[in-house]
Image (tube, rainbow, N blue to C red):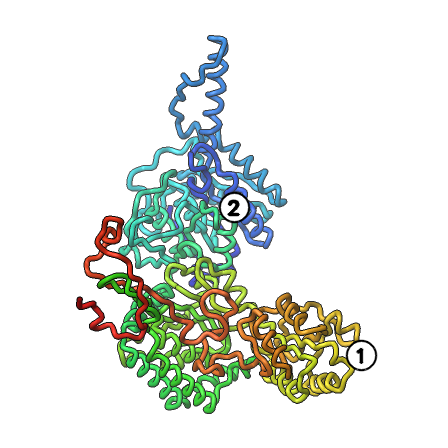
Amino acid sequence: SVINKAHSSSFAHRSELRQAKRIVVKLGSAVVTRGDECGLALGRLASIVEQVAMLQNQGREMMIVTSGAVAFGKQRLRHEILLSQSVRQALHSGHSQLNDMSLPVLEARACAAAGQSGLMALYEAMFTQYSTCTAQVLVTNLDFHDDQKRQNLNSTLRELLHMNIVPIINTNDAVVPPPEPNSDLQGVNVISIKDNDSLAARLAVEMKADLLIALSDVEGLYNSPPGTDDAKLIDIFYPGDQQSITYGTKSRVGIGGMEAKVKAALWALHGGTSVVIANGTNPKVTGHVITDIVEGKKVGTFFSEFKPAGPSVEEQTEMARRSGRALASLHPDQRSEIICHLADLLTERKEEILAANKMDMDLAVSAAMLKRLSLSPAKLNSLAVGLRQIATAAQDSVGRVLRRTRVAHNLELEQITVPIGLLLVIFEARPDCLPQVSTLAIASGNALLLKGGKEAANTNHVLHQLTQEALSMHGVKEAVQMVSTREEVEDLCRLDKMIDLIVPRGSSQLVRDIQRAAKGIPVLGHSEGICHVYVDSEASIDKVIKIVRDSKCDYPAACNAMETLLIHRDILRTPMFDQIIDMLRTERVKIHAGPRFASYLTFSPSEAKSMRTEYGELECCMEVVDSMQEAVEHIHKYGSFHTDVIITENEDTAEKFLQQLDSACVFWNASSRFADGYRFGLGAEVGISTARIHARGPVGLEGLLTTKWVLRGDGHTVADFSEHGTMKYLHENLPAGQPLAGQRDSN
């Protein structure tokens, strides 16, 4: 049982699993059998077969190592015995007495013999649905001891794979002898086939597989037995981490526990095969667990020989949360000092920042990307001004008393502002976002995990270093962490037990992807910025031209840029209408006509494919409405509740528009581009939210705070206020700004 030298090194990162060509999928007994252990879990098997067939049809070479023959045979033999006993009872007494029947103890080898053909027939029928052919291969430990048998097995499997057939492999439990004591793993080069974990590992190395997926009834490898208080799922397991693991009992079925799985996995890893141990029984993920693993998603425990120098993202998250609590407990003056120091660093170290920024811009692939990436001395100065505004606001943020109530004599209740906790902010190619968001987090006492776009990697690195340098002045350097590993956004969104709020800053597609991926974590943001400008019949032509030009042309890619221009019908075929069209043409804005607008025109612009389009370029939709009310209805139907504008000189019409329109930002005679935290005087924004709950519109410092209730008593109990108690509720409102000290009643 000595293996040859490892064929190649295993994959270093999960993302590389997409390159896996030859894959072994091991199905544990708990995956294949039902909870009652007396039959097969047909739904799970059907899902697994579908995923394997899909990967096979992609051109990968798939092999399955399966349990289940004993369970299938046990079910079949029990049925046959019950049927036989029923017939004998009927012949003997004229009626069935099934309640008196007792089943004999069924021997495992006999069950396997009876179940192997049925199990294989089931697999064959399932794979046939996907035009995929299968072949059964039964092996024992002895087949690997004999060189000739091992070579024959290798040759057979390779021929099957060459013919695009999925080999389904199992130990021949009908004849297999009991495992010999101490024969499991004799050093790193020897493995004994005593269960399907060791069989799968042996086959994976023998066949030079790229990936072994071992499915069982647990999510993966934990640092202590699952279910215990401190048990944590290990995302990536390195061979040197074995001493940090405490193993529990083995699975409810099967003969291999987690310790056996880890030993087999490490053996396969040493042989050059990457390994993932994951849950194949969870109904929420079973339908895509195998394909998710192959796509590199964070599922189960990934075994890697390549330990990175820095901390893992889970370790970074823990560090940020721990340091964030210390940040929240600082005096407001100290948080303001950190922010002011960061503002100073942005100007003092501008040469260092701009040098890194130039490296990023040199790699930019488009003019639009260059504009998003670009920093300048003027932009850094402007950033510093905004940061100092936030530093001033930070004086009155965390710990502010919003409400104070005297519940009863010597029983006082306060509602105070507190940080949300740990924020994950994902932003694309805008490096100026990093100091803005970091400052808002510092001011609000929140820990922060940042994931920036690779296009701005050099600039982000320098800006993050400066942020941590500023945090160091009060010993909370780790409160702001930058994720620089190869973590996918979807993987970060799975950290639902550690992250309290996700804020996406980027394209509408990025926001939608994160909203879909975030299971159990609130997402603050907007998926689209379909902003409208409505030109009323009583609008001023000068204001119309200025506002429409600025809303569309100042920065077309911004989420607060105009995407649809609504025109009152009375403006058509007037000098105002002609000037609007001429201005848009001069600015090279492509016009897409809405259905009603197209019917009025003598020229023929392209027809809008949808009235709900975010162009993000020098393009916009134009449509005609009969009234302000119809404009409001149009926006409610097609808008994204981001920012919408009315241009009119009629104050009554404007006020009705502002009152009736249900968007986060509603403007009268002002450009939609004002929807911005800095322009609102918030210093900066963490993002713009169109949600109904919590913050809405540009989200600054206030939007990153929540509240908690603090009750101060003197031995009070609810029983004191019962029918026979001695106290009565007062519920008196007290001034919120009243100092805490000396508030006790003295009488």
Which quadrant holds residue 316? bottom left
The residue positioned 36% from the left and 83% from the top of the image is: 392
Q: Which mark is residue 431?
A: none
> Tag 1: Cα neighbours inside 10 Å, few (<14), some, or many (≥20)?
few
Mark closer to the chain start, 1 or 2: 2
Q: Amino acid at mark 1?
A: Phe
x and y percentages locating residue 676 in the rendered image: 50, 79
Above or below residue 211? Residue 84 is above
The mark tally for this picture is 2
Left or right: residue 443 versus residue 126 is: left
Residue in the picture at 42% in, 40% down: 29
Q: Residue at x 26, y 53 (%)?
A: 721
Mark linked to residue 48: 2
Point 46% across, 70% down: residue: 695
Q: Say which residue label 1 marks.
A: 603
Residue 195, quarter of the rendered image: top left
Which amino acid type corresponds to the residue marked 2 in the rendered image?
Ile
Where is residue 338, by image quadrant? Answer: bottom left
- Give the position of the N terminus as an image quadrant: top left
Q: Classify the position of the C terminus by image quarter.
A: bottom left
Disc 1 element: loop
